[in-house]
Each structure stands twice: as C-alpha cells, then as structure tokens.
Image (cartoon, rainbow, N blue to C red):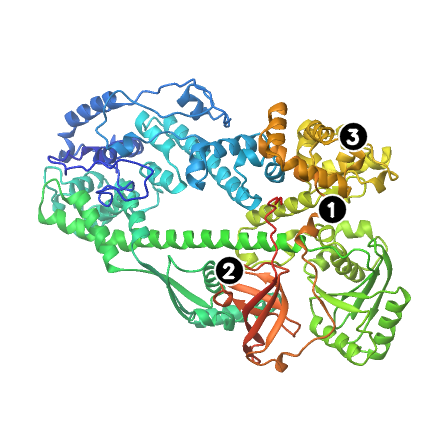
Amino acid sequence: MANMSSRPRRLAAKKSVIVEISDSEDDPAGAEENDEYRPTETRRRFIDRAAAVVASGSDTRKRKTEPASSVCKDDAPAKKKRAKKDKENAIPNQSNDVNEAAVEHPLSIASELDGGARSLTPVTSSTSTGRSSFWERRKVWNIHELLAETEQIQPTAARNIVQLFENENTIPFICRYRRDLVDHITPDRLRDIRNTYTEIVDLRKKAENIVNQLERENVINTEIREELLCAKTNEELEFLYAPYKPASKGTLAERAKALGLQHYADALLFGTAPKVQLFSVVDPTNKDLATEELVMAGICNIIIHNISKNTRILEELRRLQNVQRIVLKCSKAKKTTASKAAASSKPASSGIADKKLDSSKFENYFNFQCDIKTIKPHQTLAINRGEKHKFLSVKVETSDYLKNELMRFISQEYMSEGLQYPLRKEVFTRALEECYTKKLQPLLCRQVRAELKEKATRAAIEVFGKNLKQLLLMSPLKGERILGIDPGYINGCKLALISETADVLETGVVYPHGRHANRTEAEKKLVQLLSKYNCGVIALGNGTACRDTEMWLTSLFQAGILDSRSIRYSIVNENGASIYSCSDVASKEFPKMDMNEISAVSIARRLNDPLSEYVKIEPRHLGVGMYQHDVNEKTLTETLNDVVSECVSYVGVDLNTASLSVLKHIAGLSEKKAEKIIEYRNQKGPFQSRKDLLAVRSIGEKTFVQCAGFVRIEPLSVGGKITNPLDCTWVHPESYKLAEAIIQECELKLSDIGKASFMQRIKEFSKSQHNLEQLAEQHKLHMERLKFVLFALQRELLQDYRADLDKRPLFKQGLTRLDELSIGDVVTGAVTNVTHFGAFVDIGVERDGLIHKSHMNNCDLSIGDRIIASVLKVDMQRRQLGLRLENMLQETDTSFTLKTE
C-alpha cells in the first residue's frame, strides 16, 4: 500500500445516485447500488492517500539506500497536486458551545471537536469535498444519540439514561423511582441498554486512542480523523483503521517489500506506466529473486496484502455476508491415530470429564447444516462445544455466487483503469485467487463464527438471568419447621431440621442406600426426628441419589410409616450447596458444624426463604441456564449479580435484621458498606429510621439516595413502635413530604398506614384526576412519581413482593416410575429450568420431562410455573421424557412492572 497514491485518477466516473437518508422504512430508489457500505470514490481515494503516507513512512528508511525506479519517476507532480488539493479540501474543526442535558465523559478528542461543549455536534464544512450526501451528512455522534439509534429508544429517554448512568444511578433505583425519565423501561431491558452504553463509551475511547496514535505519527488529516470518530461500531472502526495497520515484519508481503518489489507490485496493481517486465527484476545473485517465478510470487504477496487491507473490499465482504446465503455445516470428526494416542495419554482427572461428555450428546449434529440467519443460539453453543472436544468438524460454506460477486467487485476496483497488458492480468488473476483463498474467505468464516458465538452467548446469558430471577423470587415458606435432606450414597443422607425462623434445631445422617445401607435404622431416625419437632415438611436436594431417596420416601408413604395427611416433601435445587458449605460465610455462621450437614441446612433454608439463602452463593453456581462454561465468565457474572441486586432490592430487607449476604446486594451498597452498617448496628443498637443510615461511615448522600427505598425499619426490630411508618413502605425519603401532604389531604394519620380503611381512602383519592393534577402542580412533580407514591401507600404494611408473584414450591407425596408412563398420559408438574429450545418440567417421575419449544403452544414458561402436559415420548434406553404443553395452571410476571387497579 506504500505507493497507492501513485494511482492515476479515473478519467470517467460512473454516474452517482444520491441516496437521501430518511427515517422511512421503505427502501429508497437506488439503495442497492449506493448503500451505506459503499463509500464514494472520493472517500476511497483519501483512504488510499493516507494509507500511502503510512506505508511510505515505514518504507522511507529502506528506500534511501535503493535506486529510484523508473516506474515512479512521473509521480512527483501528481503528488504535489494531490497534496495541494488535500489541503484545500481539509475540513476545519468548528466549535459549538451549546450545552445539552446529557453529560458525557471528558474525552480529549470529543472536547476538541466541540470546543468543550458537553455534547458533540455535527462537523460541517463550507468547502465541498465531492462526497455523496450520505457521507456529507455523517457526524461525530453524541453518546445518547448513538444509544437511541442502536437500542431504538426515544432520544429524550436515551439522554436521560446516559445522564443517570453517568451519575452512578443503579438499575433498581431508576426503574422504581425514575421510571418517568426512562419511558417505563423494565430492568431487563435497561440492563441490555446499559451494556450497549458501556460498549459505546468503549468505542469512543478506542477511536480516540487510534486517532491520537495516528496523529503522533503524523499520517492522517482532519477529514480522516473525523471519519474514524464517526464510526458507529467496532467493525466499522476496524474497517477504517485497516489501511493504517502495519503488517508484521515476518509476513510474506513485508519480505517482498524488503526485496524492493513494492514499486513493481503497485505498477501492476494500478496499471501505471511504464509496463513492468519481470526479467528486468530478476537478480541471480539473490536467491529470493533468482527466477521470474520467485519475482512474480513476491509481487503477488504484496498485492494480496493490499487487496486484503482495502477498506472498500472489506465493506463489500461484510455486505455480501449479510445478504448472501451462508451455511454452517457439521459432521462427525474423524479420529486420527495421533488424537487417539493423545487421548490415551491424558491424566486420569481429565478422563472423568470425558465420561460426562461423550459423543452421543452430539448425535444431532453429526450430519447437520443450517443457514446462519436461522440457526438457534443453543445449536451454536452445542456445535462450538462439540468442536472444542473434537467430536464435531465444522465449516462455513459459501456459495459460488458470493465468491464471483466479490471477485467482480475487486476486479472492477483495480482493473477498470490503467494500462492493460497480459502480465498485469496474469499477476492480478493469480493474486486475486490466492487472496480469496488465503485471506478473504478465512476472514469471512471467522466473522461468521464470531458473530454467531456472540449472538448465542448473549442469548445464553439472557436465559441465565431470567431463570435466576424466577428462582430467587420463589415464595418463602414461612411458619413451618422444615427437615432438609442432602441425599448421597457413600456418605449417606445428611439431615438438618430448622425452626420457623430458620434456626438449626438438630442434624444427623442416615444410610438408606449404598453398601452401608441400613434402611430400618434410617426409617426409625427419620420418623423420630419428624415426630420430636412436629415437622411436616421435607426439603429434598435434587443432587446425587435424589431419585433413589425419593423412591425411599414414596415407599414410606405407601407403607403408612409416613402420614400423607400431615407430611409432604418438595424437591429443592441444591446446586452450589456444597460450595457454600466450604465457604468462609458458612464457617462463620456454623463454626462447629460438619460441612456435609451445612449442605442439609442450606437445602432446608432454601425452602424457608429462597432469596436469603441463594444470595450466599455465587449465582453462576446455581445451574439455572445452558452452556454456562461456554460463555464469557465476566459478562455472565456481572449480569447475574445485577439480577440478584434487582431481586433483593425489589423484595427489600429489614435494616436491623438483614445479614451481610443479603444487605451487600441492595442497590447502591457494596460488601464493605454493608459491613459498616452491621458494625454500626452492633455498636449503636437498631436503626430507628432510614435517615440514621447517614450516620454510618462510608454512607454518603449519593449512596443513601440509591439504597434508602429498598431498606425498611420493621416495628418488631425496634421494640414494636416505629418513629415514622413511612420507613416501612416503598415510599422513598425524598417523597416523604409528598406522602404526608397526601395523607393530610385525605384527613388520615401516619399511624394508620397499612390499615384497610387507610388503603381504601387513598385508593378513592387516587381515582380523582383533579386531585392528582392539583398535587402534581403544587409539588412540581411528574404525574408518574405522584402515582407511584399513591401506589406505595395502598400496599399492606410489610407485604412481601414475592406474595404478589405467588410462585410457591411444588409439594409431593409419592413418585411415579418412568416405565409406568405411556404416550398420551396427562400429567401436572412445575417448570424447573428454561432454555431457548424448551423447558424442563418435574412431573413426579425419575427424570424431568422436556417440553420442546415447538410443543409450547406459543406460551412463554418460567421457573416455578405450574402446567398440565401430555406425554409425547418415553425413551427408556436414553432415560428421556418428551411432553406437550396442554394448559397453564399458574402464570407469573416477574418483570417488576408496577400494576395498579
């Protein structure tokens, strides 16, 4: 690319079609020939000129010792003219001092562009650059503008969202107390928008770093600088930056340049005079230039490099990728002798993992092909895993039409001008074929695979987040003593019985299975424990030996040893229980208890209060999703932690009784801040009001605003009488004056909050539009915030948010064997896991059944939903059960959307 600027200008340009940019969804006339992926000829030329500056800068030192070639003698006048014209066409920076509401990060490049204004403005020019209307109308974007465009939200909402995030507002706080500013966006949607916002900020920083680097090297002008800052995606930025990236010194192209073949390659690529004669370049004394074939190979390597770095060609490749049919093909991988030997030489520890993952799990993909536009996320992840473990062979197959279209485009790009002679055509044809095979097609395949993986990863993380929310919001089982059983074979079934307040009453171990089995003694101890503490609920972990233990309990019910009228059991997700039992949190809570028994305590408490117990465990260990180990761990952890924070914040906690594990997840708080709160509570006694939080070290005004609405002061924790009853409601301290005004207007008392008569009067008051408008005008508040305060005052005191969802655990008193089911049987059950390909349901048999997405009747299921299903398939050999959804017994909404009657 060093002498790309030596290419003569075209004598006759094609007639350009001006494409007006509009918000209409209809395709404008001529859009196919002039879409946004096809920059104008002028833009291509300035990129080529800048690339020449970059390359010439790197080759200057080399060329000082080389004689000037006759090929480039006539280029000096042309270069001077172009340099003069470049100077004339340079777009001057213009400042704009108009301040906008959105506050952006103090970026050096951004501030330079807009003269220090808070928001960036379009860069305009009084001189014409001969560019099409599309490129003339491009501008350096504001963060909120690109966010609105990318996420398709209202510009005002986007500006508010950016400002809220820059001011470090949390998602739970925004969605509850600033809903009017963000157009009532749900937390899940806002989390996606925040991820996009972070990507946009990173994109701006990356563009600035590139610009600063190239400016230090003095290789770009103002126009190209602005083009780089206008890039709206990482891909576009990479396209624009590609011509300036120096190749590695060890590449074939760089070796050929070192031999002095750059000038001849440029002359053949652009058709400049005089004609190149290979024999004149041959140098018998140099082994790399000893024959014409070696010379041609070197020239081809340089041309291949130049073509593969051409921005217009990369953009055309991207366009073809989006419009042409591309197929992902899978087949069973062939095991070579080498791979078998490598497998046999692996240590025993890796063999355990191999047993869990055998080739039968990928049988569906041994002869599989699918268009990349219709492939499902779970299919992509399964294929990637199969390829990683050498079970599958994967390739991306493109059509001949795509190749021919790209070849035609590249030929038109270079061969439509300049001198035409046989050697030039021969070299270009050879270089083009090699470039497609070695550079462009592999690049296309990498892009396709990378995009599929990113799409699938996002989908998998989305499933994790949704399932985790359903699990955390399961209704607690209050007022019951619970016996937790952590089933096992060798170490027996660990027992732990807890009180109504989750205190441990007794622990033990029984051996109903395995070589140490003593069923008589196990039955005796189980019955004795249940009778001693008058316990009627059993929480059974769903891990190893779960079904065997369930069969054992079923036999006790059938024999009358356990009374089915007073005793029932529920299957509890025990994922992460063993990890928790070995953690520092568990050792502090149970310093003298055996780790195995701690697992049983955790299982019992998960039924007593799922949220309080699950938050003690890292969300990624809870196993509610698909392909956990195939997605980005950092992104998954951040998303799941956000979901935990949302759930804990919306349910709320008592400031005087909340544990560190729960308190640290409240919006605005961290583990250190939660520790300070507990330390203050232990030293000064219980908090009397929310405002007391401000007396805690490290809790400032900003933190208080974020967390105050999600913590409460319950009367029982302060001796039965609370200073301000509003501290026990959803009303935020910032709205206390408004709430008091409403209560006074309704002729009520603060002490009446939570009473039926109080709630009825507030409800009647809120129905009058005149009352609402009068209050909103009086307090200068948005109507939405006023309605929320009224909504909060209509809730029962201490009403658990999870009670609104009513996702109760599924209790059973017996188990059906898989072989007792037949096709057509109608069963009931509860959803235990949801993926993109279907939902798993516990119907009381040995294994969960799968309702495939095609058999869901267009219903969206979530964890905990009760359903009626019919049996479609019973595969005893593979122990699989297929179901069809017939009806929903209970459907819940956990979108945290506030609904008023």
Q: Which residue is mark 2?
A: 836
For label 2, the SS is loop
Between tags 1 and 3, which lies in front? 1
> What's the amino acid at mark 2?
His
Instruction: Tell whether 437 sits left or right of 738.
Output: left
Is 402 left or right of 482, judged from the image as shown? left
Mark 3–mark 2 distance (CA, rounded to whole Å): 46 Å
Give 137 or 425, whichever is nearer the viewer. 137
Up/down of 492 relative to 859, above or below: below
Tell me the CA gap for discs 2 and 1: 34 Å
- Residue 560 on image: x %, y %: 82, 79
Q: From the top left corner, tell me how far across and down residue 653 is, in percent.
A: 74, 43
At horizontal 36% and vertical 40% (from top left) the residue drawn is: 236
Q: Amino acid at mark 1?
A: Gln
The residue at which mark 1 appears reads as 799
Determine contact: label 2, label 1, CB under 8 Å. Answer: no
Per the image, the residue denoted by label 3 is 692
Question: The C terminus appears in which quarter of the rendering?
Answer: top right
Q: Quadrant of residue 19?
A: top left
Q: Nearer the viewer, residue 110 or 163?
A: 163
Tags 3 and 2 touching, CB below 8 Å: no
Tell me which residue sits at (60%, 52%) in the image: 893
Q: What element does badge 1 sit on?
A: loop
Mark earlier in primary sequence (2, 1): 1
Image height check: is 274 above or below 121? below
Question: In the rendering, at what x and y percent does residue 375 appear?
Answer: 41, 60
